[in-house]
Structures are given as structure tokens and as C-alpha cells.
Amino acid sequence: MVVDYECRDGVARIHLNRPERLNAVVPALTEGLLHAFDQAVDARVIVLAGRGRAFCSGHDLKEPTPEETSLETRQRLEQIQDVTRRIRAFPGIVIAAVHGYALGAGCEFALGCDLIVADEHAQFGFPEVEVGLSVTGGISALLPKIVGPARAKELLVLGERITAAKAAAVGLINRVVPAGEHEKVALELAARIAARPPVATSLAKQALDRGLDATLDEALATEVDHAILTSVSGEYHHG
């Protein structure tokens, strides 16, 4: 098993489990991730982390170059993109707990999540251009909106690794925690979120995600729709 899944008290834990390769991405890992999200139907929150010394070091460049048609290449890449789609479609919150390397596709997996908690020694980066590849996980849309177009181009074109502290300073991640505390803190946040009203939490995520691509009028209309949904959900009385 290259991806582990468990769920307790509404909090699912998904672990990338190729520690001998720093959880580098191969088709089996992508398929395992998608299967794990399929299992998370009863989860309120998901914590995504990596076993061993890293979160995910990106595509496994030591694997033989696949002999495939253009159609097969498209299908393989779109399956990787399905991870981003599945994270964003998940009605609850997905928290990335990052340590070691989050590079290339690994950084894309993390940035697709709703929140990122990083070990102080974590490193983030996009080495694709340097090795003659291109980004695939929706980063061309997400990254400029997170850090601005100028810094996004710098990160992609230069491919320099940045520390957790710098990643937090530019708004790439949410929290930097002491070494080895990334999963503990992520699970603490997950427990807090899982205890909150589920409809309101899900709508907050949806509103912000949709707002990234919406006009102001569209965002205002969505907010009214969501206010009506929360009023009929009965969660207001819970608060």
C-alpha cells in the first residue's frame, strides 16, 4: 500500500507511504490518493501527510520514462489533476501536514488543500522547469492568486526552494510549527473544525473557492444563497 487511510471521530488521515522514495509520485500513489478520498465519505476533515522524511518530493524521476501515446499521457496527467479536483470537491476541510520536501507535484498537492501546516524545516518548490517539465496540479491558476503573478513566475521559472518561514511570509502556507509537530498541530486544527457546524463550514469553503473566479456580483449572490442555506439548516441554534 503506497497510501494509508484511517478515519476516527470524523477526522480522516491520509498518508503517502513511499518513504524509501520520499513519497515521490508514481501512478500507484495517485490512484491510492484518489481511492482514499473515495473512502472519506464519513469524514468531516482530512489531514494529508507523508510517511518517512518528506511530505512528497514530486514526480519520481528515477522511474523509467513511460512509453505511452499522447492520449495515455493526457490520461495520466489528468489523473494527477484529479487529486486537486477531489480535494476541492470534498465538502469538508483538507489540511496538509507538511515536513521535509514538498516539491513539484508534492507542492501542488499541498497547495490544493484548504490549510497547510508545515514543520519549520519543510521546504517548498517547483523544480519542473529546471528538469524540462511543466506544472500540472492547477498551480497555473492557484499560485498567482495566492502569492501574486510576479512572485508566482519567480517560483516557477527559477525553481528555487523556499523555507517554511518564507512560505508563510508570502502567504503560501498557514502555520509554521516546531520540528515534528506538523501532524499533531494539523490534527488539533482538524478536531476543532470537525466540532463546528458542518453545513456552515462547508459553505465557507465553497464560497471562498468560488470567489476566486467570481465577479463581485456573483460572490454577493453566492453569499445570499449560502445565508439562506444556513438559516434552514438549524445550525445557527447550535452556535
Image (cartoon, rainbow, N blue to C red):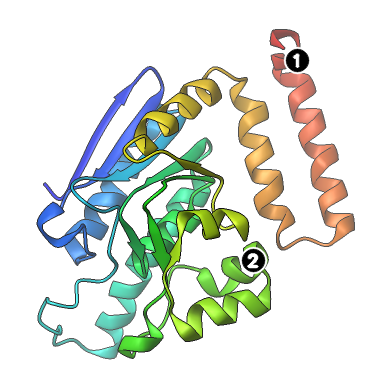
Residue under the image location 49 percent in, 80 percent down: 156
Q: How many marks?
A: 2
Residue under the image location 52 percent in, 37 percent down: 93
Instruction: Look at discs 2 and 1 and give the one toward the viewer.
Output: 2
- Give the class, few, some or many, for how many residues have Cα within 10 Å of label 2's Cα (few <14, many ≥20): some
Residue beneath label 1, please? Answer: 236
Residue under the image location 38 percent in, 17 percent down: 9
- In the shown orientation, is residue 8 left or right of residue 201? left
- In the shown orientation, is residue 99 left or right of residue 44? left
- In the shown orientation, is residue 218 left or right of residue 147? right
State the SS at label 1.
Answer: helix
Label for residue 147? Answer: 2
Q: Find residue 210 and report its horizontal and vertical position in percent.
A: 69, 54
In this view, 237 is above or below 85: above
Q: Quadrant of residue 42?
A: top left
In this view, 49 is above or below 24: above
Q: Amino acid at mark 1?
A: Tyr
- Give the class, few, some or many, for how many residues have Cα within 10 Å of label 1's Cα (few <14, many ≥20): few
Q: Amino acid at mark 2?
A: Val
Q: Nearer the viewer, residue 183 or 231?
A: 183
Indicate which disc, 2 or 1, sits on the residue closer to the N terminus: 2
In this view, 53 is above or below 48: below
